[in-house]
Image (spheres, grey):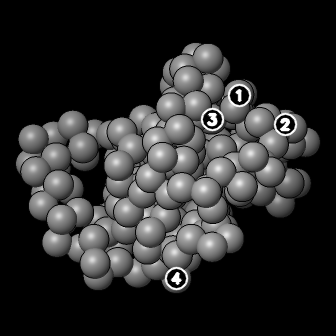
Amino acid sequence: MATTDEARRIDLARQGDRNAFAELVRAHQGPVRALLRRLSGGQCALADDLAQETFLRTWQSLPRFRGEAGFGTWLYRIAYNTYLMHVRSAKGAAEAHAANLDESENQDTSSMPSMDGVAHGEVQRALLILSPAERAAILQCYYLGLSHAEAATVLNCPLGTVKSHLHRALGKLRDHLGESMNKRVSDAPYEQPLRA
């Protein structure tokens, strides 16, 4: 749920107030860039380009924001759709694949997810073995802390599909990362409560 200040900024931005929108961008750019960086396999330049495109699309779509989902959830949905459009383009898919191969050893791992006993780089490489849908589900639920229902809204798929993606992804990560992953995942809650 949006705070009173955020709700005010959203209303002003919907009326065309660029300063209010700039405040919304400042408040949300870190999480959006981090999500896109993780979705893109640690490619910072690509993530920054996709974040810029996300906020441009958000500005253009603000008049259609109905508030049925939280602003952050709606924004993550736009970011995810922007990422998918990039991946679906033939040029984007080829660039992403080549960049993943080139950058796998040169990634900025300072803000990557970590697990006890597993290096940041190893976690990032493990995320790359997942399908884009599985990686997105993991990032939405475990990195952003969204509930399964919120992730389903962002990913535009049924709740059961999110749970299936998570189940398959966690299995692949367990196989790839071994015992340290088994301990960490078994300690994690299966479903996170909805936030107020």
Residue corresponding to mark 4? 110
Q: Are marks 3 and 1 in contact (CB under 8 Å)?
A: yes
Q: Can you tell which quarter of the image residue 151 is in?
A: top right
Residue corresponding to mark 3? 151
Secondary structure under tag 1 reads helix
- Quick one: label 3 or label 4, which is nearer the N terminus? 4
Secondary structure under tag 3 reads helix
Q: Amino acid at mark 1?
A: Ala
Q: Are marks 2 and 4 in contact (CB under 8 Å)?
A: no
- Quick one: label 2 or label 1, which is nearer the N terminus? 1
Distance from Cα at disc 3 to Cα at disc 4: 25 Å
Q: Residues within 10 Å of mark 3 (few under 14, many from 20)?
A: many
Distance from Cα at disc 2 to Cα at disc 1: 8 Å
Distance from Cα at disc 2 to Cα at disc 3: 11 Å
Which of the pair 78/34 is nearer the observer?
A: 34
Residue most extreme to the front? 179
Q: Quadrant of the N terminus?
A: top right
Which of the pair 51/7 is nearer the observer?
A: 51
Q: Are marks 3 and 4 in contact (CB under 8 Å)?
A: no
Residue corresponding to mark 2? 194
Distance from Cα at disc 2 to Cα at disc 4: 29 Å
Instruction: Name above or below for residue 177 compared with residue 109.
Output: above
Distance from Cα at disc 3 to Cα at disc 1: 5 Å
Residue 73 % position (x, y): 64, 42
Q: Quadrant of the C terminus?
A: top right
Residue at the (65%, 44%) spot, across then down: 141
Residue 81 % position (x, y): 40, 39
- Quick one: label 1 or label 4, which is nearer the N terminus? 4
Q: Are marks 2 and 1 in contact (CB under 8 Å)?
A: yes
